[in-house]
Structures are given as structure tokens and as C-alpha cells.
Amino acid sequence: MQRLLAILLPLCILACSDGVSVQSGTIFPQDVELLPGDVVFRRGSGVTSQAVLMAEKGGTYSHVGIAVDSAGVVMVVHAVPYEDEEDRVKMEHPNDFFAPSKAQKGAVYRHRDNETARQAAEAAARVYQRGIAFDHDYDADDTTKMYCTELVIFAYGKTRHPLSNIRSHHLHLVGFESNCFLPSDLQHCKDLQQVTMF
């Protein structure tokens, strides 16, 4: 039992995915227009999401991504494990990011400066194009691999105005220890303003 907890607890606390199959439909409102650089949050209904929310100590969302322009279509770039054969940064349509099987609720936050947001979106698209692997160690100091919140912070870090006052959390669990960023750290960032929640 202790061995099982040592394997599952870090995944449950930190994973940014519910690990369930995609269903048709979306909870994403069709009247919401995403702009490049928008930070999108979702809350899943699975066990993993509930564990992330417990680690958040009252946080609202369990996963985050960033909107990018892909040949004129706004897509979401995010780092998520266990959704494909390869655990890599992925790009998908907002309707898929907010599929009912993955999302119970969502929100969109926007940077105060449009040019900064555009630069962050371009940086996130480059991360996707490089095929960066998911960071199962949740090590914010190692940018050769990335997890969800780290990706957004990294992308904005490539702009003239990196996100300010973002603090990491030191998590020490059975067989696992790391400094990492949680979705609520982005949600409470003063540089981002809520556009909508659903």
C-alpha cells in the first residue's frame, strides 16, 4: 500500500490532466473570443483534478494553457501528461481543451498589455514546435521539460514584461520533492485580468 501511495500521490497532487477519454461537445462558450496570449484555466471532475485542488488548498482550477495563433486559428498550447502516447506539450482547439470529459468549469484571463500577450503566445507556439516533453519531475528550474503552469510562466518570461510576483511552492511527498508553480499562482497574478468564467 505504501508503494502504491508513493507512486500515485505525486501524480494525483501535481498532474494536470484527468486522464480520461475525450467526448464530443464542449463547455467553452461560443461567444467568447480568445486572443493570443490569453491564459485559459479548466477544472476537471476526475480524481486527479480533485487531488490538484486539494494541493491548491482552495484553488479553483486544476490545469492551465495559453492561447496561440496557428495560421489564423486560435488554439490552446498546454503541457499535459497521459492524453496521448507521448507526453509532450500539445496544441488543440479550445473546444477540445474544454471537452466535457476534461473540463467541469473554465475561465479565461488576459494580460493587460496586448503586445506582451502576443509575444508570450509566440513563445508558447515555439515550445510546442520544439516538441518539448512533459516534466514529470515538476522542476521549474529545468526548462528542457515543462508542466502546465511552468509553460505559461516560461512563455511570458520571454517577453519584455514577465509575469510578476509568481511564487513557487515546495512540495515534499512520499518519494517526491519539488519546487513547482500551481494554477492558482497564475490566477492570482496581478498582470492577468479575468475575462470570463464558465
Image (cartoon, helix red, strand yellow):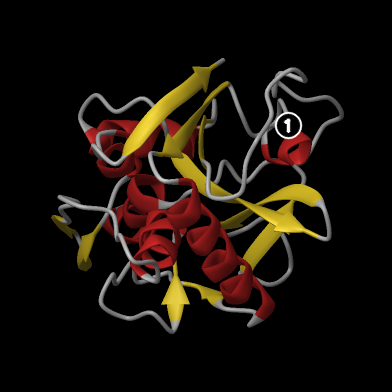
Q: Amino acid at mark 1?
A: Ala
Q: Quadrant of residue 53?
A: top left
Residue 8 seen: no
Q: Quadrant of residue 28?
A: top right
Compared to residue 62, the image places residue 5 above or below, namely below
Q: Mark 1: which secondary structure?
A: loop
Residue 25 location, x and y as percent? 83, 25
Q: Quadrant of residue 81?
A: bottom right
119 left or right of 76 in image: left
Of residues 30 and 113, the one nearer the viewer is 113
Of residues 5 and 11, the one nearer the viewer is 11
Residue 159 location, x and y as percent? 39, 67
**For the point 76% across and 39% down, which residue is it?**
96
**For the point 81% across and 49% down, which residue is it?**
73
| Quadrant location of the C terminus in the rendered image | top right
> Would you name the residue on which mark 1 appears?
99
Residue 20 location, x and y as percent? 68, 41
192 left or right of 118 in image: left
129 left or right of 24 in image: left
Of residues 28 and 3, the one nearer the viewer is 28
Q: Residue furthest right?
A: 24
**For the point 55% across and 77% down, which residue is it?**
133
Residue 184 seen: yes
Dot 1 crowding, Cα within 10 Å, few <14, some 14–19, many 20+:
many
Compared to residue 175, the image places residue 186 above or below, namely above
Give the mark count.
Answer: 1
Residue 125 location, x and y as percent? 63, 67
158 left or right of 166 in image: right
